Image (cartoon, grey):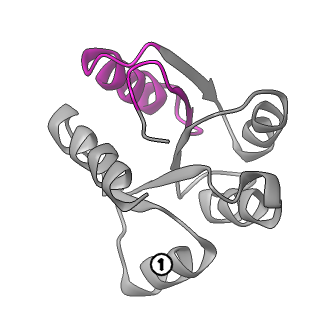
Amino acid sequence: MSIHRYSDILVVDDSGAVRGVVCKLLTKLGYKSIDEASEGAVALTKISEKQFDLVISDWNMEPMNGYELLERVRANKKYEKLRFIMMTADRTIDKIVRAKQAGVSCFINKPFGAEELQAKIMQINKDN
């Protein structure tokens, strides 16, 4: 199923400011159902309580980083098709390889704008 304006999206970042910016970008793009989590454990709880279509998570968070969140999500067969965009300011090849092996859908470099975010969501729709 493709991501559309009524898809349920979860934005995960330990920075409230970053979560706010990403939520505003999604709203600007027409997405209607956006939820937030301040860290990985909160995100896991929300994912277990509601069926999300897309998770957009920061890599660098404490105490559970985005990579650990991705691994935990992918460890549950129930969420194997949940689309997952990793936000990062540090796109080293090691991170990219590790995240791809763990099942990330795609990366987005921080900072980014609405057009780039929409392009990543469209890429996910084409890939699935």
Quadrant in which the C terminus is drawn: bottom left
> Is 29 one of the magenta-colored residues?
yes
Task: Please report the residue visible at 38 percent of the width from the left and 19 percent of the height from the top.
Answer: 31
Residue at 80% across, 43% down: 41
Residue at 31% in and 55% down: 126
User: For residue 60, what is the image quadrant?
Assistant: bottom right
Horizontal arrangement in the rendering, residue 69 relative to residue 60 (left or right): right
Instruction: From the image, tell me which residue sits under label 1.
Output: 95
Q: How many marks?
A: 1
x then y, percent, for residue 10: 58, 32
Residue at disc 1, secondary structure:
helix
**Location of residue 99 with respect to 1 vertically, above or below:** below
Amino acid carrying mark 1 in the image: Lys
Q: Is residue 48 left or right of residue 24?
A: right
Q: Where's residue 87, x and y in %?
A: 42, 53
**Bounds of the magenta span?**
4-32
Q: Residue at x 52, y 34 (%)?
A: 15
- With respect to residue 18, does 109 lie above or below? below
Q: Position of residue 118 (x, y in %)?
A: 25, 38
Does the magenta run of residues contain 19?
A: yes
